[in-house]
Amino acid sequence: MSKIEWTEKTWNPITGCTKVTAGCKNCYAENIAKRFWRGRCFNDVEFHKERLNEPLKRKKPTMYFVNSMSDLFHENISFKQIDQIFCVMVQADWHTYQILTKRAKRMVDYFHSYNGFILSRGIWLGVSIENQAAVLNRIPSLLKAPAATRFLSIEPCLERIDLFPFIGNSTLTAGARWLLTKTDNKIDWVIVGCESGPQRRPCKIEWIENIIAQCKDANVPVFVKQISVDGKVIKDIAQFPKHLQIREYPKNKIGE
């Protein structure tokens, strides 16, 4: 099982990535690659056809984080290769797939190449958010994606972040031509946490509390992954302050 608290298992048909944003500075995946890849550069993005069928072999319904060691929509991965990955997800539809990207615009370009394409309810799409600029740059693209469940991973949280107007009821998105409602384009889940690792940047408890408050006001489930207290990263939820002991999931999960 995965050590990532909000998923159950990882599936990496792609490995390797390149940095595109402030959130990439202390990439955990790059640090893992330095330890275990025996000379291969993390910037070498590879498609692993031999790993495609892993979800088909597992019959127990499982939550998969897709490409924890890369980005599905990396520019070095062709749309045809992405097709192959989605094909497996559609076939092995007893699982739940969590896809997280920093390349939200390329994600939208991919789906626009399939006019009217709609994902099954077990395929979730999310974007990484680390600061307010990422909110404005990535969430509008996520809201255009044809997913039944859309989520945000605010990790590392590098500053106070305002999610308005992208969560909640009947709020107009910047530059959009439609209203967000509970039954329309919306954010369904938010993960939030501090940065970890020896070079971690600070994350104030107040920033985490602010995200929780916004999610509660909008009736959006929130998952507090890890927090920083007195300069120490705490991952054990039992050691969180009581008001931060929140690990909720969206309802749209296979098997529920």
Image: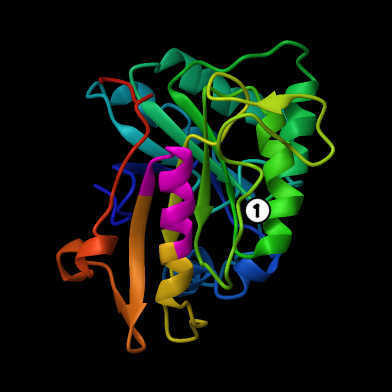
Q: Which residues are magenta?
A: 210-222
- The location of residue 114, given as percent across then percent down, is 75, 16
Q: Along the line of sight, which residue is nearer the eye, 233 or 172?
A: 172
Q: Quadrant of the C terminus?
A: top left
Q: Which residue lies most toward the left here?
A: 238
| Magenta stretch: helix, strand or loop mostly | helix
State left or right for residue 43 relative to residue 137: left
- The location of residue 25, given as percent across then percent down, is 62, 74
Q: Secondary structure at mark 1?
A: loop
Q: Along the line of sight, which residue is nearer the eye, 78 or 152?
A: 152
Which residue corresponds to the image point at 60% horizontal and 65% vertical from the top-left? 42
Q: Amino acid at mark 1?
A: Val
Task: Say if 118 sits above or below 176 in the image.
Answer: above
Which residue corresponds to the image point at 50% horizontal and 62% vertical from the top-left? 155
Q: Along the line of sight, which residue is nearer the eye, 137 or 34?
A: 137
Which residue corresponds to the image point at 32% horizontal and 21% vertical from the top-left? 254
Q: Residue 54: which quarter of the image?
A: top left
State left or right for residue 217 relative to residue 142: left
Q: Which residue lies most toward the bottom here?
A: 230
Which residue corresponds to the image point at 49% horizontal and 82% vertical from the top-left? 202
- The location of residue 31, given as percent across then percent down, is 48, 73
Task: Say if 74 sits above or below 32 in the image.
Answer: above
Residue highlighted by disc 1: 45
Mark 1 Cα shell of 10 Å, populated few (<14), some (14-19), many (≥20): some
